[in-house]
Structure formats: C-alpha cells, structure tokens
Amino acid sequence: MMPGTTGKCHLSGTIAALACCSCLAIRAFDVILDPAQVSRLLAEITELHDQSKNSKTRAAQLEGLYEMGERVLDLTGLMTQDLSGHGGNDPSLVGLIERRLKENGIVISKYANAWHYDMAAFREYIRLAPAGPRALDARYALVGFDEPGDDVAGLQKSIAAKESFLRSYPKYADLSVVELLLAQQHNHLARVYSAQHQTALSEQQRKLARERYQRIVRLYPKSEEAETARDALAVQ
C-alpha cells in the first residue's frame, strides 16, 4: 500500500491496535508464542534479509528491508503478548529467536514488560531512500513504536517527533493513530511529572492530552481512535 492512501496497511493496523488497546485479555492456557509460527516468521525474516542484501534491483532490496522490519515487529508483538498473558516466555524459544535474529544483524530487547525492536530496518530504509515508496510508512513506524519510558527528555522528544509528523504529512492515512499516541504520551508525561511532584507541569500535560482527545473526537468521530479518546475523556 502506498503512503497516504485510505486503507490501513499491515503496520498501520499493528500500531492502531497498540494505541487503542491498553491490554489484551489472554487465557492462561492460550498458546501465543507458537513454535510453528515463530519458525515461519524467522524464516521470512531471513529470506527478507537476504532480499535486502542480494536482490538484483534496488527496489527489491528496499522492499525486503522494509518488510523485514515489519516481520520483526510481528514477532516482538507476539513475544510481548505471550509475556503479558503468561507472565514469561519460554527461555529456550526466546534464546532461539535471539540467536536467529542476531545472525541477520537484528537486535531486540526486553524492558518495561515488553519486547522491543530497535527499528534499525526502518531507519536504514529512510537513510537509503528518503523519498522511496515506503519511506513515509517507515517514518510512521518510527513515531508509532517510539518507547521512551519514563524519561522526561525522551518523552518530550517523542512528543515533538509526533507533532512534526502531523505537520509534515497532513494527508497521511493514519493521522488519527498518531494523534491518539500523542495524547497518550501527554498523559504519560503528566504522570511522570506528578510522581516528581511537579503539579503545574503535570496539569499542563493533562490539559494538552484532553485537547488532543477532543480533537480526535471532532475530526475522526467514527474511528476506533475516537472511541478510545471518548473513553479517556470520560475518566479524566
């Protein structure tokens, strides 16, 4: 799918789901990190890595690079669901995943009760083809999966990046998702300031979050993001 079109691509759906769902209801006996599915994803990642390095055309190399990044996000998403649902991952399976990814120069890590990808494929795509056919989707991935934790400077930088994306790409298909992520980060920063007893700064961020939620409801009233925004406004 080309950037800016009306439908949601695979990556867009993943980011939207993360933005709209604070948790996933998982039964204890559900198998999330299925070895067969893991094996398939690892095989696809290896194939796409090879495509990104060895294809005869630059276009095929770039497409392999971008798609490899998406598959790694699929895999870390499954690992995080498994971690949340079962309280841990199978160490032997995680070890296999990390070894296989390392063979392809891919780095993932676990922190804050989730698995994270360093997003290197998307950064490399933008470096190689800043105006390429998937460059805007790569930029969307970088703002969508930015995880600064509780670091104030990191949160401020992440907020600024999302605001810049909204200004720079006003016709992108999934602006409502970026708006929602931005509102949630304002709330996150408000909680961090509150924990630091910086009441005025905390309230300022809550106000910015409320305004952003209200904007989502006004501009995208029938979207899933608007539903999430309404729920957030109801408890503020």
Image (cartoon, rainbow, N blue to C red):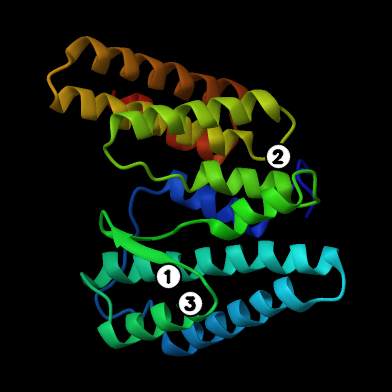
Between 12 and 105, the one nearer to me in the picture:
105
Measured as percent of width and height from the top left, residue 128 is found at: 73, 53
Provide the secondary structure element on which disc 1 rests.
Answer: helix
Q: Is residue 8 visible?
A: no
Indicate left or right for 21 with 13 as reference: left
Between 56 and 210, the one nearer to me in the picture:
56
C-alpha separation, residue under disc 3 versus residue under disc 1:
15 Å
Give the labeled residue for mark 2. Answer: 173
Mark 3 residue crowding within 10 angstroms, few (<14) / some (14–19) / many (20+): some
* Residue 101 - label: 3
Q: Is residue 137 visible?
A: yes
- Which residue is depicted at the point 53% across and 31% down? 162
| Mark 2: amino acid | Ala
C-alpha separation, residue under disc 1 versus residue under disc 2:
25 Å
Measured as percent of width and height from the top left, residue 163 is found at: 55, 25
C-alpha separation, residue under disc 2 versus residue under disc 3:
31 Å
- Whether label 1 touches label 2, CB < 8 Å: no
- Which residue is depicted at the point 49% across and 52% down? 17
Measured as percent of width and height from the top left, residue 178 is found at: 55, 35
Between 102 and 32, the one nearer to me in the picture:
102
Provide the secondary structure element on which disc 3 rests.
Answer: helix
- Whether label 3 touches label 1, CB < 8 Å: no
Measured as percent of width and height from the top left, residue 28 is found at: 24, 75
Give the labeled residue for mark 1. Answer: 78
